Each structure stands twice: as C-alpha cells, then as structure tokens.
Amino acid sequence: MTENQHRSRDGFGSKIGIIAAAAGSAVGLGNIYRFPCEAGNNGGGAFLLVYLFIVLVLGIPTMLSEFIIGRKAQRNPVGAFRALAPKSAWPLVGFMGVFCAWILLSFYSTVSGWTLEYIVKAVGNDFQGKELAAIERDFSDFHNLGWRNVMWQSVFIFLTGFVVFNGVKKGIERYSKILMPLLLLILIILGVKSLSLPNAGEGFRFLFHADFSKITGKVLISALGQAFFSLSVGMGALITYGSYINKNDNLATTALSVTLSDTLVAVLAGVVIFPAAFSFGIQPTAGTGLVFNTLPMIFNQMQGGYFFCIIFFVLLAIAALTSTISLLEVMVAYLAEELRITRKLATVLASAATLILGVFASLSLTGDTKFVVGRRPLFDGLDFFSSNILLPIGGLLTVVFVGWFMGKRKFFGEITNEGQLKLKMKGVILFIIKYIAPVLIAAIFINCIR
Ligand code: PFF
C-alpha cells in the first residue's frame, strides 16, 4: 500500500490524535457505568485486583495485537485477516468482531440514551432536594417507559451515525483531546467529595480491600469480560482504528497510554461511586441503579451541584458517543470495504440494523417485558454473550494469530516501524502474546464454561 493510498484512508493527523481516538473508544460507559456494576457484583477489592492483573497481562498484549493487525493490513477486521492470511478461515474472526460490534452497540446505545434523559433531568433541576427513595423511583419509572428509552436510544444512534456519516477522525480527535481531560478532572472532584461523605471509608475498603477467598471462576470471567469491554478489544474496533494509525507512530507506547488512561478512569469511577453508595445506603450489587442513583445524590450534596451535574452527564454522553462511534465504525468499515458500497450507505444500513436489535434490548428492561432469554432480559443476555463469550474468544484468536500465524519477521517489523524504533522489550512482548496471553485467556474461559 502506497503512502497515498494510506492517506486516502484518512489516517489520524498526529500521534496524540490516534491516542485520543483510541482512548475515546476505550473510555466510555464501560468505565463509569459497567465497571462499578461488575465490581459491585463480584466482591469489590477481589474483582479490582484480578481486573488490574488482566488489563496488564492480557489487555495490553491484545490491544497491541489488534493495532499490529490493523496497521499492517490497512483494512477492516474481515479484510485485514483476509489480507494477512489469504485463503484461510481467519477472516471468520473478523466476522465475529463485526457481529459482536452489532450486538454490543445494540445494548450500549440503550444506556447511552439514558445519559441524554439524565442531561434533561439535570438541566430541569430534577434531583434537587430529593431523597434517595424518590431518585430510585424516578429511575425505575423511566425504565418502565419503554418508548422513552427507545426514543433516546434512537437519538443516540442517529448522533453516532451522523458523526460517522460525515467522516470520523477529525471530530473524535478534537473532542477527545479536550473533553477527556475534563472528564478526568470532574471525576477527581467528585471522588474528593465522595470520600468526604460520612461512612465513606467503608465503600473505599470495599473497593480496595481484596478478600482472596472471593476470587471465583465467575469473578475471573467477569473481570476478563470487563477488561476487554473497557479496553475495546476482542472485536476488531482497534484493528479498524489501527488501520488508520500512521506508519511512524509507536504502537507499543500507544497501547500503553490508552490502557493507562482507560484504567485510571475506571478506578476513579469506583472511587466516586462506592464511598458515596455506602454512605447513602445503596447496595454495591444495585446494578444499573448504582451509578444513576448514586451520582444525583452526590450532586445534591455539593456546592454548585446543579452545574456539576449537567457537566458530568454531558461529558458522560460524549464519552459514550466516542465509544459508539468506534463500534459503528467497525460495521461501516466492513460493509463499505467488503461489499464495496459507499460509506454513507454503509452508515445508514449499520445504524438501522443496530436500532432494530437495540429496540428489543431497551424494551426488555421494562417491568412487564416479554423479551427474555433464559431468565434474563434480552439486554443482559446480549451483554453477557458479547462481553463474556465473544470478546474473550475474539481476543484469544487475535493473540494466537499474531503470535503464531503472522510470523516473527512481520511482527517485529510492525512493532519497530521496520527497524526505526529500538524496542528492547520486543522479545518479551512476543513471548507474552505467543504463550502467556493465549494460555491465560483460554484457562479463564474454559474454567467458566465447564
Ligand atoms: N470500551 C467502551 C467502554 O468502555 O465504554 C465500550 C466499547 C467500545 C467496547 C468499542 C468495545 C468496542 F469495540
């Protein structure tokens, strides 16, 4: 592929550009909404410990592997595997990623829609002076209004489609660079407030005190699923973004920076949520309500809470948007490049497909829902299937591909920018990708389904 062709795929402008965009994909509802839910349901400290280990030992190598595949092949996930392993079954891994993006975006857009509802509530000063019981009632009433959930979800999918329709890169770069640090700042302010509430110490201990006896197979697979979900790996989003990375950017440090920012935001979200939740008497296992009920309660007790509340939910919506964009982009890049249709048509088709499944996901959360799989609402079923099954399998196959099938020469060439970078750790990195990551991912996965 020539430099010109590379440009024509609309590469990211600068190094900070790709870090910002990949971090924009990684940082989202997964950090602020899903991480506290999962930590709360899986024992707090024990979960955090396993989570951090997995991010470090499995998350970074998998992310790097996706960047390597994407930048080497310069294509969408299906095309990338086809280009690097012609006439093999590997493109199926890419297909699985596109399928996973569809499922993930369908339920992710439900929660993204909630952020819009909460912006409206925040602007209307809806939480002011309310007790916890009233805030909880409002949340469950809203859940039961299926059509309202669907309306916000549709707005969100439309917004995502709009950005992707008009060409992604510049928009994401610009927003991520300014607004992500702002999100970090507001989380720090909220964390300080949360820690100063009565009884906050208990929530802090819940998150940071690891009781090893709580580490079960379920904790391991949940932490693996959460780590991959949060880092946006295991389904080709970062293969797609990797295909837009410039040939002279350092892939290893990019993966490291993205992972560090993502993990920092998740841990900070935990520091905001748990001390406050314990202080207000909200159970750590409260699931969806954990974030949407705890946060308004914190704002209620803060000086300037009205403004903080608006800013927070706006930033949360934007963090969700930079993630939904990357999910839709996986489908759009695939449809446009493989079916050879225009990007615009691909965007319309991918958005419509998402909305169709997404509506059922949203409606499955109302009290009298008929949309259940097994005994769970479709929403939870889609989340479990994509995060705890498809992402680990996708991640496993990705590292196996890079470690065993791509070839050492291509691997070292890509990771050192064809010899331009002196990367002392490259042998160690390959060892982890080839042996440690596949064995550990497979062990956690098999242990859970057995
Ligand atoms: N990483 C995003 C989050 O934590 O909210 C969610 C996500 C985006 C997952 C893109 C997967 C993906 F490909």
Image (cartoon, rainbow, N blue to C red):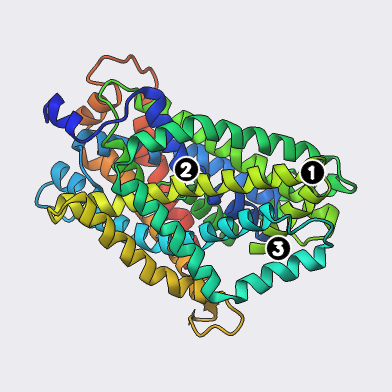
Q: Amino acid at mark 1?
A: Ser
Residue holding disc 1? 194
In percent of width and height, residue 12 lies at 31, 30
Q: Is residue 444 above or below residue 411?
A: below
Q: Amino acid at mark 3?
A: Thr
Q: Quadrant of residue 351?
A: bottom left
Residue holding disc 3? 285
**Residue 26, which numbered label?**
2
In percent of width and height, residue 424 lies at 38, 17
- Which residue is located at x 67 percent, y 38 percent? 187
- Which residue is located at x 68 percent, y 67 percent? 139
Does residue 340 appear left or right of residue 346 in this picture? left
Q: Is residue 377 above or below residue 407?
A: below
SS for callout 2: helix
- Which residue is located at x 15 percent, y 48 percent? 82
Q: Nearer the viewer, mark 2 or mark 3?
A: 2
- Which residue is located at x 76 percent, y 58 percent? 127
SS for callout 3: loop
Rate crowding at label 3 as few (under 14), some (14 to 19) or many (20 or more) other CA atoms within 10 Å: some
Q: Does the residue tagged 2 have its C-beta within 8 Å of any atom of ligand 1?
A: yes
For marks 1 and 2 on the same chain, the one whose residue lies earlier in the sequence: 2
The quadrant of the picture occupied by the N terminus is top left
Q: Is residue 4 above or below residue 383?
A: above
Q: Is residue 286 above or below residue 364?
A: above
Q: Please indicate, yes or no, whether residue 395 appears anywhere in the rendered image.
A: no
Does residue 120 appear left or right of residue 364 in this picture? right
In percent of width and height, residue 175 lies at 46, 35
Q: Nearer the viewer, mark 3 or mark 1?
A: 1
Residues tagged 3 and 1 counted as in contact (Cβ below 8 A): no
For marks 3 and 1 on the same chain, the one whose residue lies earlier in the sequence: 1
